Amino acid sequence: MPVHPVDQLLAHTSVLIIDGGLGTELEGRGTDLADPLWSARLLVDDPEAIVAAHLAFYRAGAQVATTASYQATFEGFGARGIDHDEAAGLMRRSVELASEARRRRRLEPGAASDLLVAASVGPYGAMLADGSEYRGDYGLGVDALREFHRGRFEVLASSGADLLALETIPSLDEGRALIELVDERPGVRAWLSFSCADGAHTRRGDPIEAAFRLAEDCPGIIAVGVNCTAPADVEELVQRAAGVTAKPIVVYPNGGERWQAGTRTWSGPADDLDPTAVAAWLTAGARIIGGCCRVGPGMIARIAAIAGAAVD
């Protein structure tokens, strides 16, 4: 049986660098994302902007581009008058755009050949566009969450992406729902990444060790970890993960600010992703590292350099 490209890369790479905040880079290039669809709006309005943003992260040293499908749902597109078939096509387009950026990067001098595309699957709360992905208080059980995710999951799982990024998950129940979908599709690869309130709990308040253990018996989940979490909490979270799972640990924190859903802005002081902190994550056991909201290509280049120095 052929070795899956994700498995192969993990087997031969000490540290895998993923990209940063796609929305952050798009806004930095002058795009207005004040919209319930967030970056998914550009799948319709300006796909070339998405390609350019992915390319910037690849050029910065990212080996994985995460697609503009985080907020792409049938419900969200439907509210814009986009029917089911067109919405599915836009989800597939998110993978095509990241793949196009990879193709362009591979044509450039010095580019790595082992570049991957991860199709983003955001939480139920991202569709609500009211900040509830940072609370996880949906009032829905595992079955309802699984069925909400199923349609988009199936589209993205068959889209040609190398793997799925099941990300910013705020609760045990939503993590379970997504793991069940992965178990239904042998051959799918995914990482499962929780958003955390502190160094010990998911946004919903679940013990993070319980969250990290969820996927231990799911071969399709190739890594577990955290994202869109304050950098100051990451070292403790990696240590907790390393104590309960044998899977590779993925971390991609935000810039440390807080999301204000009412104004759709970030506020408060940012944390500096300094070399000492990144090196500590690696020492604690992180193997897949990048950034989330408020982390642009410049910071990814720094993370890549720190990781490279640590491996050397």
Image: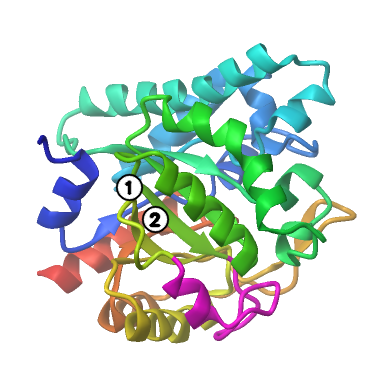
Kindly state the secondary structure of the residue where label 1 is placed.
loop
How far from the left and from the top, in percent, is residue 87? Answer: 66, 19
* Residue 16 sits above or below residue 1 on the image: below
Mark yes or no: residue 101 visible: yes
Q: Residue at x 79, y 65 (%)?
A: 137
Q: Main secondary structure of the magenta part?
A: loop
State yes or no: discs 1 and 2 in contact (Cβ < 8 Å): yes
- The quadrant where residue 2 appears: top left
How far from the left and from the top, in percent, is residue 125? Answer: 74, 52
Q: CA distance from mark 1 to mark 2?
A: 7 Å
Q: Magenta span has 95? A: no
Q: Residue at x 51, y 31 (%)?
A: 154
Q: Residue at x 65, y 35 (%)?
A: 39
How far from the left and from the top, in percent, is residue 135? Answer: 76, 67
The number of numbered badges drawn on the structure is 2
* Residue 176 sits above or below residue 257 on the image: above
Left or right: 289 as drawn, with respect to 193: left
Which is nearer the N-term, disc 1 or disc 2?
1
Kindly state the secondary structure of the residue where label 2 is placed.
helix
Q: Nearer the viewer, residue 25 or 133?
A: 133
Q: Quick one: quadrant of the C terminus? A: bottom left
Q: Nearer the viewer, residue 72 or 185?
A: 185
* Residue 230 sits above or below residue 144 on the image: below
* Residue beneath disc 2: 300
Left or right: 217 as drawn, with respect to 42: left
- What amino acid is found at the position of numbered circle 2 in the picture? Ile
Query: Farthest residue in the right direction?
Result: 262
Q: Nearer the viewer, residue 62 or 76?
A: 76
* Residue beneath disc 1: 62
Q: Quick one: quadrant of the N terminus? A: top left
Q: Which residues are magenta?
A: 195-214
Which label sits on residue 275?
none
